[in-house]
Amino acid sequence: MKVGDFASVLGPFKATAEARYRRHSQDVFSQLRHACDIFELPSIAMDTIRLEPITIKHAEAIQRLASDPLITDTTNIPSPYPHDGAAVWIGQLTDRMQAGEEYAYAIIEGETLVGVCGFVHVPENKELVEYGYWIGTPYWNRCYATAAGGLALEMAFDQLGFKSLLAPVLTRNAASARVLEKLGFRRTRIYNNTRYLKWEKTEMLADYELTRAEWMKSNTRSEG
Ligand SMILES: CC(C)(COP(=O)(O)OP(=O)(O)OC[C@H]1O[C@@H](n2cnc3c(N)ncnc32)[C@H](O)[C@@H]1OP(=O)(O)O)[C@@H](O)C(=O)NCCC(=O)NCCS
């Protein structure tokens, strides 16, 4: 990956990201390329993926993709997805993003929104922050969740100052568990669903966690 390519797609984060990637010879995209066997997937160009803070301009694509029951089945997104679900969600999100309580990003490749990721329930001490994501079904299994996850971890630990991340996943959601494993998360517990009203208590959840220190270590980075 050329540094210039990377910097051009990362928007507001490009200055620090570019500097860091100049400092570190082993970059996260090299690792993700390996993890996703990207060379057998010519349809994806990781260098061109970027995360954009969600605004109303993303509503149409989110509405279209999130209306798929395969997205709402394994996320906390309402099902069936309301006809104005995206616009209403984005309207409420703006205040929460400004207050630092929540951060939501569109995963964009080229001009196309392929999914959404973000951080919810951000506590004031930034100790344990929940990470969530979905990829539109036309784009599944092309490594988008893993690649976007790499960028999201950069943002969480380098830009937003989070200390650790938590991702609760339905145990029947094997693809999501695999994405988290590829990103370096460890499974910390399995339990009956008491977290989400949307699902029965008989559903099983697994918590996955990643600390900043673990992320730093796995990317052979040094503090400071
Ligand atoms: C989970 C999800 C985000 C994955 O997105 P994606 O872009 O397809 O993920 P990636 O391509 O980066 O990686 C998927 C991995 O799961 C694997 N996988 C896919 N389906 C699988 C299955 N049924 N069982 C086991 N592994 C599976 C893929 O082979 C790949 O692993 P590999 O690289 O080792 O081969 C996507 O399926 C999705 O949005 N699902 C609905 C919403 C959701 O569940 N969000 C997460 C809530 S916790």
Image (cartoon, rainbow, N blue to C red):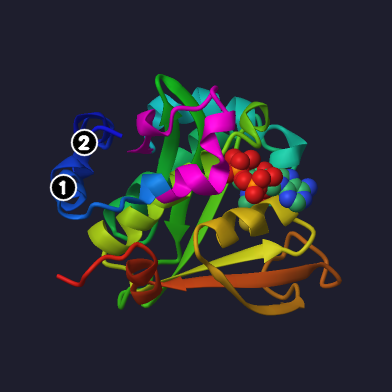
Q: Secondary structure at mark 1?
A: helix
At label 1, the amino acid type is Arg
**Mark identifier at residue 3:** 2
Note whether residue 107 is visible.
Answer: yes
Q: Residue at x 25, y 29 (%)?
A: 5
Q: Secondary structure at mark 2?
A: helix
At label 2, the amino acid type is Val
Q: Nearer the viewer, residue 22 or 103?
A: 22
**Mark identifier at residue 111:** none
Residue 160: x %, y % from top left: 27, 60
| Label 2 CB-ligand 1 distance < 8 A | no
Q: Is residue 32 left or right of residue 83?
A: left
Residue range corresponding to the magenta coloring: 31-53
What residue is disc 1 on?
A: 22
Residue 70: x %, y % from top left: 75, 39
Q: Residue at x 24, y 57 (%)?
A: 159
**Vertical position of residue 111 compared to residue 71: above or below:** above
**Vertical position of residue 156 compared to residue 56: above or below:** below
Q: Earlier in the sequence, mark 2 or mark 1?
A: 2
Q: Quadrant of the N terminus?
A: top left
Q: How many marks?
A: 2
Residue 29: x %, y % from top left: 38, 45
Residue 30: x %, y % from top left: 39, 46
Q: Quadrant of the C terminus?
A: bottom left
Q: Nearer the viewer, residue 142 or 42?
A: 42
Q: Is residue 99 magenta?
A: no
Q: Give the quarter of the image for residue 180.
A: bottom right
